[in-house]
Amino acid sequence: MKGTRVATINYLMDWIAECNGGMLWCSGLAGTGKSSLVGTLHELLTVHAGMWNRLGAFIRYDRIEYSDASHLITSIAYSLGMYD
């Protein structure tokens, strides 16, 4: 929803701009807005794509579809391999 989580999004944009080489892990209970937050962040970063060279990933892990957590690493490796 437009206008929500502005402080969180600003914090994340600042964190990305600083580029300290770290990783940010976004986790939480189902339905708390993680996907919406990352979707908004993706839209903003698409607009500002020329400003920064950053690699990011959004991984949705469905425990019903992937009952074995080892598939997560394979999925990440595949996604990185497809990055151009």
Image (cartoon, rainbow, N blue to C red):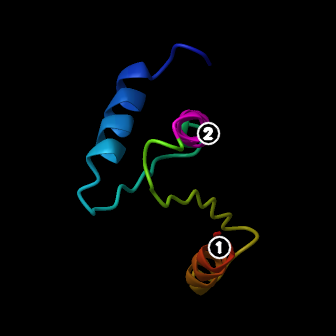
Does 84 appear in magenta? no
The residue shown at (32%, 33%) is 11
Does 44 appear in magenta? yes
Amino acid type, mark 1 = Ser
Q: Position of residue 44 (x, y in %)?
A: 54, 33
Residue at the disc numbered 2: 39
Is 20 left, or right, of 79 in this rendering?
left
Q: Position of residue 31 (x, y in %)?
A: 60, 38
State how many labels appear: 2
Is 81 left, or right, of 34 in this rendering?
right
* Spatial CA span between label 2 and label 1: 17 Å
Instruction: Give the mark, 2 or 1, whose residue is nearer the N terminus.
Output: 2
Q: Which mark is residue 16?
A: none
- Above or below, 82 against 24 in this view is below
Amino acid type, mark 2 = Gly
The residue shown at (51%, 43%) is 50
Question: Which of these two is toward me, 20 or 69?
Answer: 20
SS class of the residue under badge 2?
Answer: helix
Q: Quadrant of residue 57?
A: bottom right
* Dominant secondary structure, magenta: helix
Which residues are the magenta region? 35-48
Q: Position of residue 70 (x, y in %)?
A: 58, 86
Q: Position of residue 26 (x, y in %)?
A: 43, 51
- Above or below, 28 against 25 in this view is above
Is 65 left, or right, of 57 in this rendering?
right
Q: Residues within 10 Å of mark 2 (few under 14, many from 20)?
A: few
The residue shown at (59%, 82%) is 77
Residue at the disc numbered 1: 79
